[in-house]
């Protein structure tokens, strides 16, 4: 595995740990943001490993998957779409109080579990 790929994955793990801290601290929308960032970095590591070039400067998980040219297992694909949609609301909330109500600890814990599963799957592909 390329050194740069390992660095992307190290950062993905670090960001997932940060997402866990945000969840424990009640900062649910930031936990979702960090989960998205972690999955994004894992995908960028995969992109780098496959193409040996720096990944595009995009936050779109679906775009990155398409650029890698891999079709994930159905459950992972659905999760990536769900995380992408959730990230829009948590990154740019129109109504912070509503977003905080919508993203309960239980919901966010599920999102983080999904993020960890996707990152683990990505690592098996490298």
Image (cartoon, grey):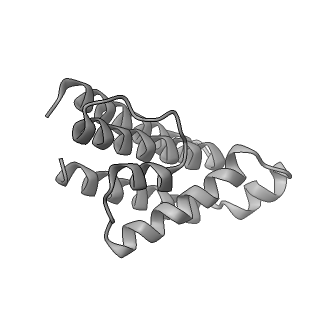
Residue plotted at (46% across, 55% down): 112
Residue 111 in the figure: left or right of residue 122: right
Q: Taking 98 as reference, is 31 above or below it?
A: above
124 sits left or right of 101 in the view = left
Left or right: 7 as drawn, with respect to 23: left
Tell me: 12 left or right of 23: left
From the top left corner, tell me how far across and down residue 54 is, in percent: 36, 29
Residue shown at 75%/45% (left/top)? Answer: 92
Residue 21 % position (x, y): 49, 40
On the image, which quarter does residue 91 sit in? top right
The quadrant in which residue 48 appears is: top left
Q: Measured along the vertical axis of the image, is residue 15 above or below residue 97?
A: above
Query: Residue 36: image x %, image y %?
Result: 51, 47
Q: Position of residue 63 (x, y in %)?
A: 49, 52
Q: Which one is in front, 111 or 9?
A: 9
- In front here: 70 or 104? 70
Residue at image position (19%, 53%) is: 125
Q: Quadrant of the N terminus?
A: top left
């Amino acid at each position: 595995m390329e050194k740069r790929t390992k660095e992307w994955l190290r950062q993905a793990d670090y960001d997932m740990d940060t997402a866990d801290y945000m969840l424990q601290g009640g900062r649910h929308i930031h936990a979702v943001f960090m989960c998205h960032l972690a999955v994004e970095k894992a995908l960028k590591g995969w992109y780098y490993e496959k193409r040996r070039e720096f990944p595009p400067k995009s936050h779109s998980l679906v775009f990155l998957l398409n650029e890698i040219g891999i079709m994930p297992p159905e459950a992972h694909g659905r999760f990536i779409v769900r995380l992408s949609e959730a990230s829009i609301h948590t990154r740019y909330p129109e109504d912070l109080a509503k977003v905080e109500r919508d993203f309960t600890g239980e919901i966010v814990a599920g999102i983080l579990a999904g993020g960890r599963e996707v990152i683990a799957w990505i690592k098996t592909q490298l």
